[in-house]
């Protein structure tokens, strides 16, 4: 089974794009599903099912700098 996200990857809540942060833990669930622990702030760390979050493109198209 492969996971959709990796530790350190920035994700956001699908239902509220203002809630984002890095994944700090992967939690395997029964039935093969995956739950992820996301750091929003030192006092706000939450867990989400894989279908509740999506990856954030930290380099949107057109904003990439090539050195």
Image: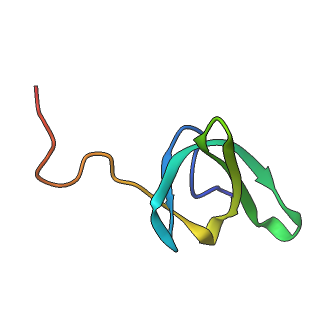
| Residue 14 in the image, given as x and y percentages of width and height | 50, 71
| Quarter of the figure that contains the C terminus | top left
| Residue 7 in the image, given as x and y percentages of width and height | 60, 40
Q: Residue at x 85, y 71 (%)?
A: 31
Vertical placement of 13 versus 6: above or below? below
| Quarter of the figure that contains the N terminus | bottom right
Q: Which residue is drawn at 32% across and 46% down?
A: 58
| Residue 2 in the image, given as x and y percentages of width and height | 65, 56
Q: Quadrant of residue 49?
A: bottom right
Outermost top residue: 67
* Total number of numbered discs in the rendering: 0
Outermost right residue: 30
Q: Quadrant of residue 48?
A: bottom right
Q: Residue at x 81, y 55 (%)?
A: 28
Foreground of the two, 6 or 53: 53
| Residue 34 in the image, given as x and y percentages of width and height | 73, 60
Foreground of the two, 58 or 4: 58
Q: Is 58 displayed left or right of 16 in the figure?
A: left
Q: Is 53 displayed left or right of 10 in the figure?
A: right
Vertical placement of 19 versus 45: above or below? below
Please name the colour scheme applied to the rendered image: rainbow
Q: Which residue is drawn at 52% across and 46% down?
A: 21
């Amino acid at each position: 089974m492969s996971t959709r996200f990796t530790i350190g990857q920035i994700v956001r809540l699908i239902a509220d794009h203002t809630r984002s942060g890095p994944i700090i833990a992967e939690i395997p669930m029964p039935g093969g599903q995956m739950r992820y622990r996301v750091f929003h702030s030192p006092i706000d760390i939450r867990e989400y099912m894989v279908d509740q979050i999506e990856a954030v493109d930290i380099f949107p198209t057109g904003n990439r700098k090539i050195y």
